[in-house]
Image (cartoon, rainbow, N blue to C red):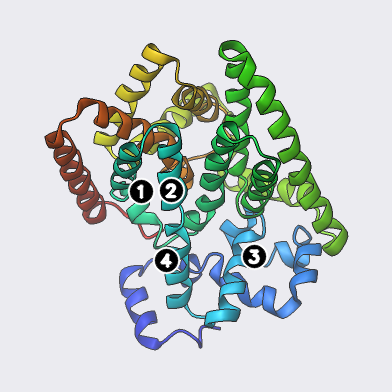
Amino acid sequence: KFKDIPDYILKITYQIWENQDVESIREYYGDVPLLDEVGFYHFLKNYSKPDIFQNLSGHTQTHPPGGVIFLWICSKIFGYNLISASLISILFTSISIIPIYLLAKELYSEKVGKLSIILFLVMPNFVIFTSTSMDGPFSVFPILSIYLFFKSISVPKKRIAICLGLCLSFGMLMTYSTTVIGLYFIVYVFLSFIFNRQQFHSLIKTLSISLFFFAAFYVFLFLTTNFDPFDALWASIKKDEAGMGTGYETVGRYLNLSIANLSAFLIGVGVPLTILWFNGTVKSIQLSRDLFPFSYLVTLVIITFSTLYTMEVERIWIFMAPFIVIPAAKYLHSRNNLSDLRWVISLMVLQLLLFEVMLYTYW
């Protein structure tokens, strides 16, 4: 079964993860041969059926099929091996740098865009997990969707709205966390209705077009492959509940889980960065009612206490990076003090090194 993996890699693997099943480091990647064996059409058609679903690895079962399809396509181009899969994942994830920079530049300035990239590249959770887990590639389309959303506000063109809808559909095919981006858009529209009625009407038009093409993508997928996204979602929910519970079994567990999720995420992005983000968000809301950080703050509270996530959010929520680094970069820029940036970068790198040394981060 592991004939494509050199013996020395297996030996090193057993030395490092001596108490772990080798299959645990082959999530998503280990499911590529199944897709190759049954074929693309059969894989999608029966994704939530027992003959396919029960043979998938644990994390694949809690996600839509996009992650396995992504690695399968990569294997057709570069061959089926761990090195290629890892390098392609890293390269694909690096694309997210571009929309983060463009978004910060669109909202504020080029200087804020550059600072955002600097902060993003030293985020502990981004550095640690994007080379070893699929949450890096999963984050690309959600992050790109955020940029397209705000681009459609400044340039209300139909083609941008169409691209936004398709980008969201690709994101949803890879991770159900794309729904968080949809929730953010809803919150932003609601706050626009309160604070900027003129912008509200433009947003409704843009999102209506995006929603149509989002739905059209899945209708097309269903007609061509019989893939049922609702069945797949339900199967993933039941799988996750079987392993992690609902999160609201008791009041104590609900509160513990909610607080732990928020704490894990904010520590994961870096304590110095979290402090900058909080100060920048509060300042922006107080001075200008900036809906970009305001909407995210509301969304974060809703998601935190929703029980939709049962831990590991320091890894899963990497796609939220723009909402953290851009307000932080704007706040740093407003202080106009180079020593602040040096201190923040130094402390972030220090936290990253401590995490790598002290924590179990094989994901």
Residue picked out by circle 3 = 56
Residue depicted at x 54% and y 30%: 303
Judge by depth and name the residue closer to the eye, 8 or 146. 146
* Residue type, mark 2 in image: Arg
Relative image position of residue 168 (x, y in whole percent): 64, 46
* Residue type at the position of mark 1: Asn
Q: Compared with residue 57, is residue 117 higher up or lower down, i.e. above or below?
A: above
In the rendered view, tell whether residue 308 sits above or below residue 228: above
If you read the primary sequence from the N terminus, does the residue marked by circle 1 or circle 2 appear first? Answer: 1
Q: CA distance from mark 1 to mark 2?
A: 6 Å
**First in residue order: circle 1 vs circle 3:** 3
How far across and how far down the image is residue 131, in percent? 39, 62
Which circle, 1 or 3, is nearer the viewer? 1
Residue labelled with disc 4: 20
Mark 1: few/some/many CA within 10 Å (<14, 14-19, 20+): many
Inspect this view and state whether residue 312 appears. no
Examine the rendering and report whether any part of residue 151 can be seen: yes
At numbered mark 2, what does the secondary structure look like: helix, strand or loop?
A: helix
Q: Nearer the viewer, residue 104 or 79?
A: 104
Q: Which mark is residue 125?
A: 1
Q: Which residue is mark 2?
A: 315
Q: Position of residue 258 (x, y in %)?
A: 47, 29
Q: Earlier in the sequence, mark 1 or mark 4?
A: 4
Q: Give yes or no for contact between labels 1 and 2 (Cβ–Cβ under 8 Å).
A: yes
Confirm or deny contact between disc 2 and disc 4 (CB under 8 A): no
Query: In the visual, does 179 lie left or right of 274?
Result: right
- Residue 326 lies, in percent from the top left, at 37, 35
- Element type at mark 1: helix
Q: Quadrant of the C terminus?
A: bottom left
